[in-house]
Image (tube, helix red, strand yellow):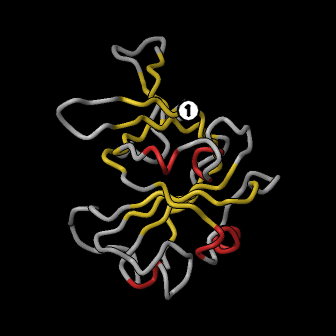
Amino acid sequence: MTFPNSISAAQYSALAVSNVAAPGDGIIDAAQAAINFALVADYDEIKNIRDMPSFGTPANIVKVPVFGQAQTQSIGAQSDAPDLELTINYVPLDWAAGTTLGDYVSDGESKVFQFSLLPAKPADLTFTVGGLGTVDNANIYFIGKIESLLINPSRDDASTATVALSIQSDFFGPFTI
């Protein structure tokens, strides 16, 4: 498939985390992404996402006074990494101690994350024609950690949790399959 080429909801968007340590150089290109997401066994999907954050580098426009001019000029400065907090419908079994996702929380190990913008459900989230390539897709990669899981019990709706991710690299992509 290719990049999505029309306006549509991204209701099947997904977030996956590689189950091996991130590359030491901190750079993820299409070839590195293919290594980390080649097989279903290479990654774990963070499921039941209720609300996704914005992915990408936010602007940091700084106003600079210029002597002799009536107004300031603006320049793009280095931006701070965005706060990536996911709200998920909390399923305790998926995040319990001793489970894969539960053990990723605060393990201190950097991993490669794959955010896939998807207007339709793919066969799987692998970086292959038979996986993500079954639907239009745009994929962004970054290195980060799952830092915390904050559980929000609810008496009148589904219990939710906030999953906080830290970022140790730039965002790479979007790439398409």
Q: Is residue 120 above or below residue 67?
A: below
Q: Position of residue 82 (x, y in %)?
A: 49, 35
Q: Residue at x 70, y 68 (%)?
A: 32
Question: Where on the picture, by quarter, is residue 165?
Answer: top right
- Left or right: residue 83 compared with residue 40: left
Q: Residue at x 33, y 74 (%)?
A: 121
Q: Is residue 17 above or below residue 135?
A: above
Q: Quadrant of the N terminus?
A: bottom left
Q: Is residue 125 above or below residue 62?
A: below
Question: Where on the picture, by quarter, is residue 14?
Answer: bottom left
Report the front residue among 15 and 77: 15
Q: Position of residue 92 (x, y in %)?
A: 45, 43
Q: Residues within 10 Å of mark 1 (few under 14, many from 20)?
A: some
- Left or right: residue 122 compared with residue 167: left
Which residue ends up furthest to the right in the rendered image?
Answer: 24
Q: Residue at x 72, y 56 (%)?
A: 27
Which residue ends up furthest to the left in the rendered image?
Answer: 156
Name the element at disc 1.
Answer: strand
Q: Position of residue 39 (x, y in %)?
A: 62, 77
Kind of residue indicated by mark 1: Ser
Report the front residue among 157 and 15: 157
The tally of labels here is 1
Q: What residue does disc 1 label?
A: 148
Q: Position of residue 168 (x, y in %)?
A: 67, 41
Q: Residue at x 49, y 81 (%)?
A: 131
